[in-house]
Structures are given as C-alpha cells and as structure tokens.
Amino acid sequence: MLLASAAATAYLLFGLYSQSTAVQVSQAELAIGRACRAIIDRYSVSAGQKTTDEKPVDLPRIVSDALSEWPGIEGGIWSNAGGSLAYAFPTYEGSGPKLDFPEAERGSIAVVNAETRQLGRSVVSHRLTRTQALLVQACPLHGPVPGLTAWTMTRAHVNDGPAYSRFLAALGFLAVAVIGSAGFLGHFLYGYARRIARLEAALEAPRSNGSDLVRLEPTGEYELDRLVDALNAAGARLKEAREQAVAAERMAAVGRLSADVAHEIRNPIGAMRLKAENALAAGDPVRAKAALGAILGQIVRVETLLRDLLSLTQTRVLVRTPTDIRSLLAETSQLHEDFARQRGVQIVMHFEGLPPSDRPHIDGEQVRRALENLLLNALQHAPPDSTVSLSARRIIREGAPHLHLLVSDIGKGIEPAMRPRLFEPFVTGRSDGTGLGLAIVNKVAVAHRGMAMFLEGEDATTFMLDLPWQPS
C-alpha cells in the first residue's frame, strides 16, 4: 500500500510538473509573439520616417530597441534574398549585448521565415530536447522593402529552474517518507513478531509442575501485555478451580475409600479371629498349625492391600526423562514371561509409528508399573494357548502427538455393570483381587496429563494409556 500510494503521488507530481512545463512553453510562446510585434511596430515607425526625410533605416537599432524590454529573447530581420539583415540580443546574460548571429539555429530560423513569407502570417516553430524547448516565431514585415520578415527566438528550460527544483524536492521527500515508513513498519512488525514468538514458545513449553497455563512475562508492548495479563489471570483462576475440584474430589474419595478399606480389612480380621478361636477351643496342635497358616495368609492379604493403598494415595513427583518405548515394553514383558508360561499364554508386542530419534518425556518407572498391572490382569484373565498383546503407537490428534500404550487379551471380558467404575478403588471382578490395580493405572495416566480407558466394542478386552507425547 505504501508503494502504491507513493507511485500514485509521484504520478500526480509528474503530471503537475508537466503542466507547469507546458505553461512555461506557452508563456515563452506568448512572449516571443509580443516581441515580434514590437519589432514590427518599430520597423513601421522607422519606415514612415524614411519616406519623409529620406534617411536610411537602421535595422539593427530597430531590433535592439524592440527586444530590450523582453529578457531572454533574441531576434532579427530576415530577407528572402539576403538572409539575415539584422540581429540583436540586448538582454544576453554574458559580457554585454550579443550581436553575432546564432549559426547553430540558422536552419530553423530560415525555415520559419520562409513559411511566414509563403503563408503571409505569423508562424511559430517548436523544437524540444531533454532539457529545453527552442521556440522561433516569424512575422511578416509590411513596408517599402518587399520580402522582409521579423523573427524572435527564446529557450524555455523544461528541466531547470524553480519548478524543476520543486519537483525534485517533492520526489525526494516522497522517497524519504516511503523508505522511512517502510523501515519503521518493518522494525515494528519484526519486534512484534519476536514478542509473539516468545509468547508462543512459552505457551508450548513442557510443564512438569502440572500447571495448566504457564505464567507469561511482560513483553513491553502495551497491547500484547494486555493479552498477557488476561492469560495470566485466566491461568490463575483455572489453577484455583483445579485445586478446589481436586480438593473436593479428594474429600469424596476419602469417604468412599474409608468405607472400602474398612470392609476389605474387616473380612481378613474376622477370618483370623475365627481361626484363632477354633484353634484355642480344639486344643489340637495340628489344627492350631493350620489355623496359624491361614492367619498368615490373611496377614499377607492385608499387607498387599495396604501396599497398594499407599501407592494409590501417596503423591509422587513425576521424573520425566526421554524414554525408549520399545525397551520399556520389552522389559515389562520379560518380567512376566515365567508367569505367562505357567498359564500357557504368549506375550506379543506391536509397535506403530514410533520415530527412532524422538523419544517422549515420561516417568518410565511409573508407566512401567501401570503396564505391569494391566499385563498381570490380562495374563490372569487370558485362556490357555492364547496371546496377550502389548502395543505402542504414536498418533496425531488435534495437531498434537500422543503416545498410546495398549494391553489386550481375549478373556471373558468385563461385565457391563462394572465398566463405568473400572478405575475406582476396590472395584474388582476377582475374589482374590484388591481392586486397586486399575486405580493405580489411572493415577499414573492423570499424573502425565493423560487418561486411562477401557476400549469398548473391541473383539478383545483392551485397556489403553493415552499420554501426551512431549518431545525430547
């Protein structure tokens, strides 16, 4: 737009200058016409006096007196037979009046005078060059001597003088204004783009502390800082809302957890009490030994429950490191190969779209534990001579990369009534289970700002960890 405006303005300036040049030429043409008539008037007076006193006519004096009032105009009297009879340039800006005929323009002068004699009226000739316009006018002289004409000549400097200087000054000012404006806008936009790039980088930076929005630093640009303040305020409100929601959820979970823990611990304690009372009443050492064994088994059950409960309730800070997903799945599979062989089940691994160079930033230890819980559940439910699939894939969703970790088996599946509460504590389909494994899996996923889910409608029973792929 700046360039287009500058071009249009330059075109208008050129048009105005062209008009001023045309005006100069017109004024010069009017001046030489009047100067030519002045020669005619002087000649007529001198010719009339000659007829009365018989004195010769002083042609050079006539021309000089006639042109003395017209600056920059030269001229003379021309004869059809003899050529130039008189010439004068009284206002010449040299050492004094110029009396020698301009030989360089003789041809143009002769042509104009010949045309005037032929037509019997005044004729004007224009000859334009890059820097000036040469104007020659011839007028017929009526008197005692036939075949005489008067002529005048001047030069209009089209690329010189005040108009030309003003034109160049206007173009120079226009060029400086356009270049200065373009430079200022370029500097302004470059600085604006750099500030926006810093904001974009700050918003896209990995956040390991679990905050929803990073606190942005002021940019120094008023309009951008208004946006920064709004984002910071929104981030603070979002963080506060999350903390309130987490606190409310934690209180509700504590209530449910307390009831479930009391129920889960009361059953083993009741069984241990019954075994101990029976052993004391019987007085049989064999029954007492069997009772002690059963009591130890119940103690192990309680210990396992408490360990899983501590894992679920204790908060662990994520230690994110670039993790090789192929190695992580291989190590998880190797830890449970013996158990899989005992049950006659084979573990197979699949990988899809994992780049060899880029590794996601995750807490490998916690993710491994979540996968172990899923893998153990699958091995316990898979029928003999079947396979359990352990898969990893990288996908793009809504423009952002995600890591999917899947564990599948072809067991009897999950009862529909249990599916909405699968990831809640103490929800289990096995009599010997604690119901905390899937809850731990969900906690690991949420800590990574992802989610754990059961994929319905699949041919196999499939659990998936959906984790954001934070690049290394």
Image (spheres, rainbow, N blue to C red):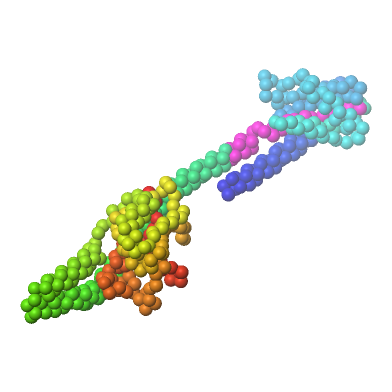
Query: Quarter-wise, where is residue 253 in the image?
Result: bottom left
Query: Quarter-wise, where is residue 21 in the image?
Result: top right
Q: How many marks?
A: 0
Residue 423 or residue 307, whichever sits in front: 307
Q: What residue is at 35 percent from the left and 49 percent from the top? A: 322
Residue 192 pos. (x, y %): 44, 49
Q: What residue is at 38 percent from the left and 76 percent from the top? A: 415
Q: Is 290 on the left or on the right of 236, as rendered? A: left
Q: Is residue 168 magenta?
A: yes
Residue 71 or residue 178, whichever sits in front: 178
Question: Is residue 177 something that shows in the picture?
Answer: no
Question: Is residue 434 something that shows in the picture?
Answer: yes
Q: Is residue 449 magenta?
A: no
Q: What residue is at 43 percent from the left and 71 percent from the top? A: 456
Residue 425 or residue 88, whichever sits in front: 425
Q: Is 142 on the left or on the right of 414, as rendered? A: right
Residue 457 pos. (x, y %): 46, 71
Q: Is residue 436 above or below residue 225?
A: below
Q: Is 68 on the left or on the right of 352, as rendered? A: right
Q: Is 233 on the left or on the right of 197, as rendered? A: left
Residue 212 pos. (x, y %): 34, 61
Q: Is residue 42 above or below residue 102?
A: below
Q: What residue is at 65 percent from the left and 45 percent from the top? A: 12
Residue 370 or residue 169, whichever sits in front: 370
Q: Which residues are magenta?
A: 147-171
